[in-house]
Image (cartoon, helix red, strand yellow):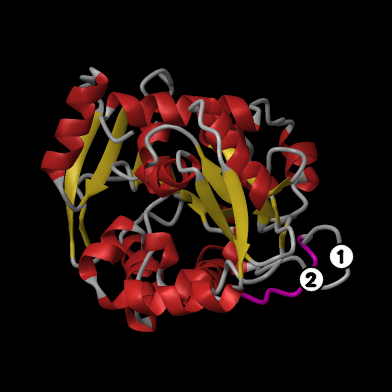
Amino acid sequence: MELLLTGSTGFVGRNLLMRLRRERRWRRIILPVRDPEKLHSQLHEEGISDDRFIPCRVARNFWELPPDAAPDLVIHAAGLLFGRRREEYFETNVEGTLRLMAQLPRTTRVIVLSSQAAGGPTPQGMNARSMDDQDQPVSLYGASKLTMERELRNRLGRRLLILRPPMVLGPRDAATLPLFKMAAGVIRVKPGFKAKQYSWIDVEDLCDAILASALVAPADWEKYGPFYLGSGGSITDSELISTAAQVIGAQGVTLSLPQVLIQLASLVIDAVPAWRTAAPSLGRDRVREILPDRWVCDGKPFEEEFSWKPTRSLSGTLAATADWLKKQGKI
């Protein structure tokens, strides 16, 4: 069997690639990347050499697949997470995805890693967003993911499985560096005076879920979806900060700031390229996702349908993330 994995130099894709080296059912694994040198460097860092890995290039959202590429399965984990304009998100997350799908055989099955942002925050008065709730994304990022889902559903039908993970945490995620730097301070800040509630998932659990769904016949994929995922119970923003502080042995006080200050800060961060790079999650578009107080989703349908259970704890996940960041010399 042949597998095509996108996003293999990103957070989730890189972790998934580490898992795939132990999966022998695929004789060839095609890896489209924008930066082949980055992929080579990461594989070297992980101490991995596998003749089954076939890199190819992505340039301006055009995919240069091998001429003989005929993947049985595509795991599409690539996408633009942080942008400034609608056109940036839609060019990559929608148009780029459709260009890839146009090159695939009509028998290829596709697992798409979308986002909870495509559905939006938990509806008012509900404990968790379900598969049946109307989609209401609040960010351009979420809108691009939702548009991608709908376009793919029209084109692929039962060959498509859409997964919507919530906040993903774990090793190899440089985007959590600001969390740990804040947690290390004497004074920490959180947006809003109310506790914000979130679903989350460990990246290893997410990889397990993706591979579990890959084993299911496509006829079953047609029955449900998109599926939300999660690591059981929800967490608060204060709990996330305090747990990050605990695993690095830091002590301090968490203060709440008016959300309007976070919005104003996002305007400044968006205007300074160096700050956008240092804190991409605080750009103007992604701050729209910070404002709602509840981002909890119901992952039970996926657990029941695919016989999968999350196993990692928040403290264990953040400890592993901190260890990886330390090895990188970042904290």
Quarter where residue 317 is shown: top right
| Mark number displayed over residue 126 | 1
Coordinates of residue 178 in the picture (x, y in percent): 41, 49
Quarter where residue 60 is shown: bottom left
Q: State the SS at label 1.
A: loop
Quarter where residue 291 is shown: bottom right
What range of the chain is rendered magenta? Answer: 131-137
Measuring 42% from the left and 32% from the top, which residue is drawn there?
A: 171
Amino acid identity at mark 1: Met
Rate crowding at label 2 as few (under 14), some (14 to 19) or many (20 or more) other CA atoms within 10 Å. some
Amino acid identity at mark 2: Pro
Is residue 182 within the magenta segment?
Answer: no
Considering depth in this image, is 76 or 313 the residue closer to the camera? 313
Q: State the SS at label 2.
A: loop
| Res 141 visible | no
Residue of label 2 = 123
What secondary structure do most residues of the magenta stretch adopt? loop
Measuring 34% from the left and 82% from the top, which residue is drawn there?
A: 87
Coordinates of residue 134 in the picture (x, y in percent): 75, 75
Coordinates of residue 7 in the picture (x, y in percent): 34, 48
